[in-house]
Structures are given as C-alpha cells and as structure tokens.
Amino acid sequence: MHCTRIAVIVLFVFSLVGVLTAVEDKSTIRAAIDKITEDWGSGRTSSDGCIWKGTSPFCDGGCNVVGHVVRQTSATGDGEKCLTGLKVLCCPSATA
C-alpha cells in the first residue's frame, strides 16, 4: 500500500516538473516550430500558381481548386512519399 502511494507521489512530482519546464520553454519551442513549418501547407512549387494537393503518408490528392487542372501526379510530389494514394499538381487552367 505504501509503495503504491509513493509511486503515485513520485509520478505526480515528475509530471509537475515536466509541465513547469514545458511552460518555461514554450516560447522557444513555439518559435522553432513556427520557423520549421512556416511554408508547410502552402503547397506552392513556383511562381506559376501550381499547388501540390495530398499529404503523406495517406495521400488522397485531388484538384478541387477552382480554375485549376491536374498537370501531374506523383507518389512523392513536393516532399514526403505517399504510402497510399498519390499527390496531384494542380495548376491554373489556360482558360481561367
């Protein structure tokens, strides 16, 4: 019974220390994450307006962008390889 209480108290203390440390370093970690992910999700490949659609590992790319057509399909596209499905390069149509 005493071992269980001691284990719970030790676990609580370590959890509390982890939370307090995380709060202290939160701004540094958040700044690093923002720097790494600032271009994620844009999907832009160049100034021609093309966008890669589909996110690995389970890509289900579709060109559902108004005024865009499929120019290319790929398992890797703009980066990480798809385990299933394909990424789709959507580019502005010539008539749009």
Image (tube, rainbow, N blue to C red):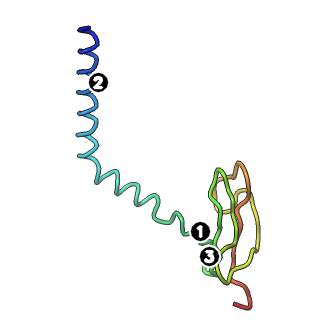
In front of the other: 32 or 92: 92
Which residue lies at the image location 71% right of the left edge and 66% below the top edge? 88
Q: Residues within 10 Å of mark 1 (few under 14, many from 20)?
A: some
**Disc 2 on helix, strand or loop?**
helix
Q: In the rendered image, which residue does mark 3 sit on?
A: 46
Which residue lies at the image location 62% right of the left edge and 58% below the top edge? 55
Q: In the rendered image, which residue does mark 1 sit on?
A: 43
Point out the frontmost of discs 2 and 1.
2
Give the amino acid at mark 2. Answer: Leu
x and y, in percent, of residue 33 in the image: 41, 55
Whether pointer 1 and pointer 3 mark residues with C-beta atoms closer than 8 Å, the reply is: no
Mark pair 2, 3: CA separation: 51 Å
Mark pair 1, 3: CA separation: 9 Å
Mark pair 2, 1: CA separation: 43 Å
For the N terminus, the quadrant is: top left
Q: Point out which mark residue 11 bears.
A: 2
Q: Quadrant of residue 47?
A: bottom right
Q: Quadrant of residue 86?
A: bottom right
**Disc 3 on helix, strand or loop?**
loop
Whether pointer 2 and pointer 3 mark residues with C-beta atoms closer than 8 Å, the reply is: no
Q: Point out which mark residue 55 bears.
A: none
Give the amino acid at mark 3. Answer: Ser
Residue furthest to the bottom = 95
Q: Earlier in the sequence, mark 2 or mark 1?
A: 2
Q: Is residue 72 left or right of residue 67?
A: right
Whether pointer 2 and pointer 1 mark residues with C-beta atoms closer than 8 Å, the reply is: no
For the C terminus, the quadrant is: bottom right
Which residue lies at the image location 69% right of the left edge and 74% below the top edge? 90
Give the amino acid at mark 1. Answer: Gly
**Disc 1 on helix, strand or loop?**
loop
Which residue lies at the image location 62% right of the left edge and 71% below the top edge? 45
Q: Residues within 10 Å of mark 2 (few under 14, many from 20)?
A: few
